[in-house]
Image (tube, helix red, strand yellow):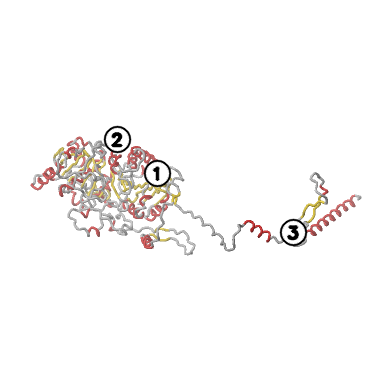
Amino acid sequence: DHRKPATLIRITAFLLISAAFFYIGKRFSDGSSQQLMFFLSNQKPDSHSSDPSSAVVGPSPNQDKAFDIAPLINASQSQNEPQRSPSTSPPPPPPAVERMGLVDENGRMTDDFQVGDYDPDQVEDFSKQNETLASENDNSKGENVRIKLNKFKPCPDSMREYIPCLDNSEAINKLNSTDKGEKFERHCPEEGKSLNCLVPPPKGYKSPIPWPKSRDEVWFSNVPHSRLVEDKGGQNWITIEKDKFTFPGGGTQFIHGADQYLDQIEKMVPEIAFGHRTRVALDVGCGVASFGAYLLSRNVLTLSIAPKDVHENQIQFALERGTPAMVAAFVSRRLLYPSQAFDLIHCSRCRINWTRDDGILLLEVNRMLRGGGYFAWAAQPVYKHEPVLEQQWEEMLDLTERMCWSLVKKEGYVAIWQKPSNNSCYAARGEGARPPLCEPDDDPDNVWYVDLKPCITRLSDEGSRGSNVTAWPERLHDPPARLESIQLDAYISRKELLRAESRYWKEIIEGYVRALHWGEYGIRNVLDMKAGFGGFAAAMIENNLDCWVLNVVPVSGPNTLPVIYDRGLIGVMHDWCEALDTYPRTYDLIHAAGLFSVERKRCNVSSIMLEMDRILRPGGRVYIRDSVTVMDELQEMGDAVGWHTSLRETSEGPHASYRILACDKRL
């Protein structure tokens, strides 16, 4: 009981102390202004004193005073400003810093650019080319505008075999004369009238029969034309069996088959040596290309050419069979192949008058024929003894003798000449000889829209014009002597450039075969749109892909086409602002490396993509390897033409400046 008063006393004391602290806090927190508290001392501070009892806490002595600090601020500003007279105006503000420039391809800032004026007509034309604005901003602040492409529509069925630069009836009707076959040459549509739709396949189109079976048969529905069967069925060219065309392997001058005919040629002139000395051949007026198709088994790559004439679709049959072919004609312009390109040029009943106009057409053959190469002519004047035909034979003998060709052999239906390998015969002809030598400044490799010239192309005394290539297959890897004559900006050895390009593409194609399973695609007809030295085509051979490649050298770059032929490959000069001289549905694979980043400065990109779709087979593939700056546009274009597109990284990784756009044209 005595503990209870003590507990009560403690509780009472605690409550009194709490009330006292509450009162003090309430007292000093009253008022509208915060009061500053200071530590004050009743005596002078002693720096050596450590007694805390000498210091007390109290309010600021200035707590009830008010101060106006505006005069202090004005006085401080007036001291910092320089003195000037009342009449002096304040200095103008410094000009705003403007930074303008573009980042070039090397990542450096450059001011070497121009800003053009706004052209409403050009914008209107752009919108008419099947391109519409997907979004616009109506407010005055301005935002980004995204352009979306509508899908291109199919062309009419009448355009199933449309070749833009050869089927331009409007331009053909304006020709002054067609006596020499001018209508079979290139006459491309004018600007604004180019192809703007998707060329459809024929009804019932099927995936092509794979090579080598396609050499002997193709689907009727893929090339539904029977006129050649009616015209040439008796000559063992082509027949129809159920739903297929079959090719017995014969021709007008080799009814018993191409193999027997090739054996005859090699026996007549053993030095021809198919597959060794003779690697690249040109078959003029090829029919359905049985000559070239059977040479493939002898390691000879033959380019078969013929005009788009009354022999309907002969080149289309050749391409469907899986043999290299193009539409081309000997008329008034140079063919789109370089000088000294072919080891053998063959004409079997090709219906060309070689001696007309002082032999200007045979002189074009001479330009393309390699020094020491052979010209084989199988025609009626060789073996028939009718007066007219005998006169034609005598004219041929006279012309070839004046061109310094030597008649090596004449046997049965065939006569074979050889072109000289140097200029010694030309120099011995004397003054005034006809046909004359071409002028020294004439470039025999300049072929794009160049007229034929009635003169003999000179051979180089240094051997750099293609006469001294090695045999196949060594020539595929041996840098040719003509490499040094290519006009190319190169600061290191050109031979090293060629070897480096070959190694580069060999590694890439090995990756495609390994990762993308190119070996399983059944690729046969291949187009390389920007071939360089032909490294891509060489890599396809090295990786044992059973295909042929047409190497295109664009006119916008250096002319490397002579080197491509010296390596034992085939190709053509072309401008991708125009259409290629081939039928729709030609290629299983189209490859374009570094093309669009260059050509988009010159050409309409949508026109190039539509042309690629025209010549690509349903079920075919497109691989575009180019700068990341163009890939978004190209992918959108690919979607607009109906391809299935996917953007892939290169082996260099996600930060590389290049990407791969893989496209499928579904069957």
Relative placement, left or right, of 429 versus 663 is left
Q: Position of residue 512 (x, y in %)?
A: 39, 42
Work out which residue is located at the far right of the displayed protein and give it: 2
Residue 537 location (% of width, % of height): 32, 42
Most extreme residue toward the left is 387
Answer yes or no: is residue 161 visible.
Answer: no
Q: Nearer the viewer, mark 3 or mark 2?
A: 3
For the residue marked with disc 1, what is the amino acid? Leu
Residue tagged by mark 2?
A: 474
Residue 229 screen position, x and y as percent: 20, 51
Q: Secondary structure at mark 2?
A: helix
Residues at marks 3 and 2 touching, judged by CB atoms closer than 8 Å: no
**Residue at numbered disc 3:** 34
What count of labels does the image hold? 3
**Which quarter of the picture shows residue 213?**
top left
| Mark 1 / mark 2, whichever is N-terminal | 2
Along the horizontal axis of the image, is 468 left or right of 435?
right
Camera-side mark, 1 or 2 = 2
Of 618 and 614, which appears nearest the observer? 614
Instruction: Characterize the local packing of mark 2: few (<14), some (14-19) or many (20 or more) Cα atoms within 10 angstroms.
Output: few
Q: Is residue 276 visible?
A: yes
Measured from the top left, where is residue 194 in percent x and y?
31, 57
> Could you tell which of marks 1 and 3 lies nearer the N-terminus?
3
Which amino acid type corresponds to the residue marked 3 in the rendered image? Gln
Residue ID for mark 1: 516
SS assignment at label 1: loop
